[in-house]
Amino acid sequence: MSIDKLPATGAMGERLMVRTFWCVALFCLGFFPAYGHCEQPARVTACQLLAEPERYDHALVEVSGDVSHGFEDFTIDSHRCANSSLSTGLWLEYGGTRASGTMYCCGVTADRTRSEPLTVDGVVTGLRDDSIFRDFDQIIHNKPYAQARATLVGRFFAGKPQKSWGGKWAGYGHFGMFTLLVIEQVLSVAPLPDLVARS
């Protein structure tokens, strides 16, 4: 009798179902501890997020690009986006209880930790605090203004259309001018040469 014709009923079938459930659960927790489930991130560009912020609102995404960090700046480069007219830019922040310590207006502090995981729009975020993330954190905090090329996985928050910014989607970051990517995992990182801070 072939395997696909074997009955899976009674106690044996129940045990098989329970084992399968736990195998899947352990796989998810082992490989995706920042999320606690098996949601796969959508691979997108920063330009796609800025061109269609409402479409990707609250989505788990994977984005690659040049990240800059300094006073009033923790963003991923979007200056070359041909169609980002619906948003002013993409602000970054760490998920979970780690914080980037980025100073900007208004009401933020340079604290590097939080007492509770970062929650945005009712969504609790996490962070895989592994060696690649620590390399990323060290690179961007190594100088007053630093830049790195990185691939990030995180939760995107579009905000809302803002009259103050000509109807563009925003609500986060410096003066609330940006959409937001909460970093939950860093997949790769490499430092880039020094540059002059953007005006």
Image (spheres, rainbow, N blue to C red):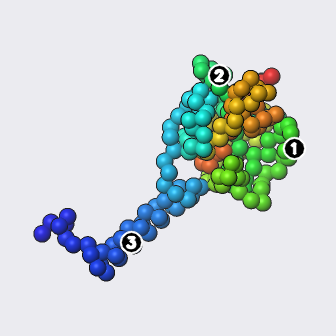
**Callout in the foreground (2, 3):** 2
Disc marking residue 85: 2
Q: Secondary structure at mark 1?
A: loop
Query: Mark 3: which amino acid?
Result: Arg
- In primary-sequence order, the first of circles 3 and 1 is 3
User: Of callouts 2 and 1, which one flags the residue occurring earlier in the amino acid sequence?
Assistant: 2
**Percent position (x, y) of residue 75?**
70, 34
Q: Which residue is mark 1?
A: 107
Secondary structure at numbered mark 2: loop
Q: Residue at x 84, y 44 (%)?
A: 108
On screen, 192 above or below 137?
above
Residue 127, image x, y percentages:
64, 53
Q: Position of residue 115 (x, y in %)?
A: 78, 60
Q: Nearer the viewer, residue 85 or 198?
A: 85
Above or below — where is 131 with respect to 8?
above
Secondary structure category for the residue under label 3: helix
Crowdedness of circle 1 by 10 Å Cα count: few (<14), some, many (20+)?
Answer: few
Bin the neighbour count of mark 2 within 10 Å (Cα to Cα): few under 14, some 14-19, many 20 and up: some
Residue in the picture at 68% in, 52% down: 122
- Label 2 to label 3, Cα distance in Å? 50 Å
Considering every residue shown, the one lying at the far top of the view is 82
> Which residue is painted at 60% across and 44% down in the image?
58
Three-letter code, disc 1: Gly
With 168 as the anchor, is 15 left or right in this view?
Answer: left
Q: What label does residue 1 carry, if any?
A: none
| Number of numbered labels in the structure image | 3
Q: Earlier in the sequence, mark 2 or mark 3?
A: 3
Q: Is residue 128 visible to us here?
A: yes
Give 38 or 103, whichever is nearer the viewer.
38
